[in-house]
Image (cartoon, helix red, strand yellow):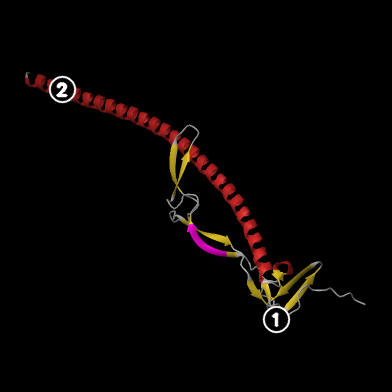
């Protein structure tokens, strides 16, 4: 004889659900506060302004706004039409038994009264806000560290290339001086030949 498993809510009963708890909206970039630039202050007091990488999309310039997933649980009406039992987990579906495209809803997120659902939504929103703030601070910390590294890296690159440029300019100056001296030597030889030729011609005329 198979044991029956009691379900918390009968099918067809009007219930309250906390919802998926997420929506997308455009918000001001927290990294640059809409200015499209991030300011990095190094330990030595040097300040650098870099294009904000948090609100960049592909190869486009920073926009000052970002698309953010907002966690927002709100009571919604829910009428279960099918039930699924997997071990100790019980979930309900709003579609017919043969429909599998809709995600099942956990029984723990369903309530008979609106008051209970509102209380559950408040707790879920508070928990989401705490997790979001932790993620935001951690992400901001990594962004600032990456920007500081970028400043150090490109400042080092500029210093190295500046030395390369100074060396190249010095070599160019040497080459120009050598070319100048070579040209002067050629011109001097040419003048001496012309002078010698003139003296020879004068000597022939005097004979």
Tell me what residue is drawn at x 34 percent, y 27 percent. Answer: 174
The N terminus is located in which quarter? bottom right
Disc number for residue 96: 1
For residue 87, side relative to residue 133 (left or right): right
Residue 169 at x, y = what percent?
A: 36, 31
Closer to us: 190 or 174:
174
Residue 130 at x, y = what percent?
A: 62, 53
| Residue projecting furthest to the front | 115
The answer to whether one can see residue 132 in this image is: yes
Q: Which residues are magenta?
A: 23-27
CA–CA distance in space, label 1 to label 2: 113 Å
Indicate the secondary structure of the residue bearing disc 1: loop
Between discs 1 and 2, the one toward the N terminus: 1
106, above or below 180, in the image? below
The answer to whether one can see residue 57 in this image is: no
Q: Quadrant of residue 115?
A: bottom right
- Residue 50 is a magenta residue: no
Q: Which residue is mark 2?
A: 195
- Characterize the local packing of mark 1: few (<14), some (14-19) or many (20 or more) Cα atoms within 10 angstroms: few
| Residue projecting furthest to the right | 1
Q: Quadrant of residue 188?
A: top left
Q: Quadrant of residue 90?
A: bottom right
The C terminus is located in which quarter? top left
- Characterize the local packing of mark 2: few (<14), some (14-19) or many (20 or more) Cα atoms within 10 angstroms: few
């Amino acid at each position: 004889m198979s044991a029956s498993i009691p379900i918390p809510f009968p099918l067809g009963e009007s219930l309250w659900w906390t919802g998926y708890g997420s929506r997308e909206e455009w918000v001001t970039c927290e990294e640059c506060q809409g200015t499209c630039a991030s300011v990095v202050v190094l330990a030595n007091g040097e300040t650098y302004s870099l294009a904000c990488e948090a609100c960049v999309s592909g190869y486009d310039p920073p926009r000052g706004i970002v698309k953010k997933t907002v966690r927002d649980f709100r009571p919604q009406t829910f009428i279960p039409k099918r039930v699924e039992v997997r071990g100790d987990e019980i979930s309900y579906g709003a579609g017919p038994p043969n429909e599998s495209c809709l995600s099942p809803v956990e029984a723990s997120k369903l309530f008979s009264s609106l008051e209970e659902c509102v209380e559950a939504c408040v707790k879920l929103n508070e928990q989401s806000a705490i997790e979001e703030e932790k993620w935001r601070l951690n992400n901001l910390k990594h962004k600032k560290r990456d920007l500081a590294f970028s400043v150090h890296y490109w400042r080092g690159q500029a210093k190295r290339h500046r030395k390369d440029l100074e060396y190249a300019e010095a070599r160019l100056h040497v080459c120009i001086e050598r070319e100048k001296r070579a040209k002067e030597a050629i011109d001097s030889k040419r003048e001496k030949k012309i002078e010698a030729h003139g003296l020879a011609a004068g000597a022939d005329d005097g004979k």
